[in-house]
Amino acid sequence: MKDENPPLIGKNIQRIRKKEQLTLDILAERSGVSKAMLSQIESQKVNPTVATVWKIARGLGIELNAILKGESESAKKFIVIQKESMAVLNTVKDSLHVQVLSPIMMAEDLEIYILTFDKGSSLISKPHEPKSEEYLTILEGAVRVKAGTSESELHKGDFIIYHCDIEHSIENIHNGSSRIHMIVRFPEKRWA
């Protein structure tokens, strides 16, 4: 005989949240579902919509079905972005070409780019949020990187890490074009 009782969604959410050591405040911030609503769902006082359960599952980093089954295994990511759908940004002079590799959902967390600098071009950036870092690998050519009072020339194959919470710049010093792979890592958000 089949089990005709509906799953205890609220209790499953609460068990998974506690196993992951998340407070209601943190889950509310991550899911976009209010702390009050989460509390009512966990205490089985309300029956959430599928959309609400989906938001909570995303906030917990698990599949929707995992909440129904009471499992807490994280969803395994496998995201493919085809080259044709990647954003390409060009500067006003079209001397710097920026290919955005990371999906929009990663913005302000971890951003990944391929930058192509034409001869004599540069990228001057204002400070990002505190404790942000940039990681560059020189794929072709040579560049000069400045961050605050620090400066270094880098050539094909070189790698650099620097804080980008100060004014910083990348200048092509090669007699042709230069290409770099850039990762911008923002500080981990501190949840209340």
Image (cartoon, helix red, strand yellow):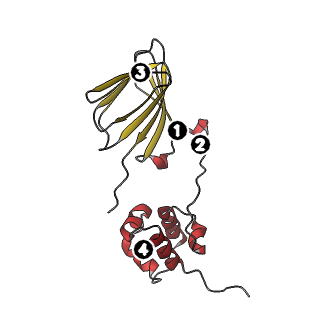
Type of residue at label 1? Leu
Q: Would you place residue 22 above or below residue 84 in this image? A: below
The x, y position of residue 30, in whole percent, is: 42, 61
Q: Which residue is mark 3?
A: 143
Q: Which residue is mark 4?
A: 38
Type of residue at label 3? Val
The x, y position of residue 61, in whole percent, is: 51, 61
Residue neighbourhood size for the residue with mark 2, other residues' Cα within 10 Å, grouped as few (<14), some (14–19), many (≥20): few
Q: Earlier in the sequence, mark 4 or mark 2?
A: 4
Query: Hey, which quadrant is residue 95 in on the image?
Result: top left
Q: Nearer the viewer, mark 2 or mark 3?
A: 3
User: Residue 65 versus residue 54: which sits nearer the camera?
Assistant: 65
Q: Earlier in the sequence, mark 1 or mark 4?
A: 4
**Are the residues flagged by discs 2 and 1 in contact, CB closer than 8 Å?**
yes
Q: Would you place residue 23 above or below residue 154 in this image? A: below
User: Residue 47 versus residue 5: which sits nearer the camera?
Assistant: 5
Q: Earlier in the sequence, mark 2 or mark 1?
A: 2
For label 2, the SS is loop
Type of residue at label 2? Ile
Q: Which residue is mark 1?
A: 101
Q: Would you place residue 122 above or below residue 48 in this image? A: above
For label 3, the SS is strand
Q: Which residue is mark 2?
A: 81
Residue neighbourhood size for the residue with mark 1, other residues' Cα within 10 Å, grouped as few (<14), some (14–19), many (≥20): many
Q: CA distance from mark 3 to mark 4?
A: 50 Å
Which residue lies most toward the top here?
A: 175
Residue found at x 61% / y 50%: 78
Which residue lies most toward the right here?
A: 1
Which residue lies most toward the bottom here?
A: 1
The x, y position of residue 166, in whole percent, is: 28, 35
The x, y position of residue 162, in whole percent, is: 35, 34
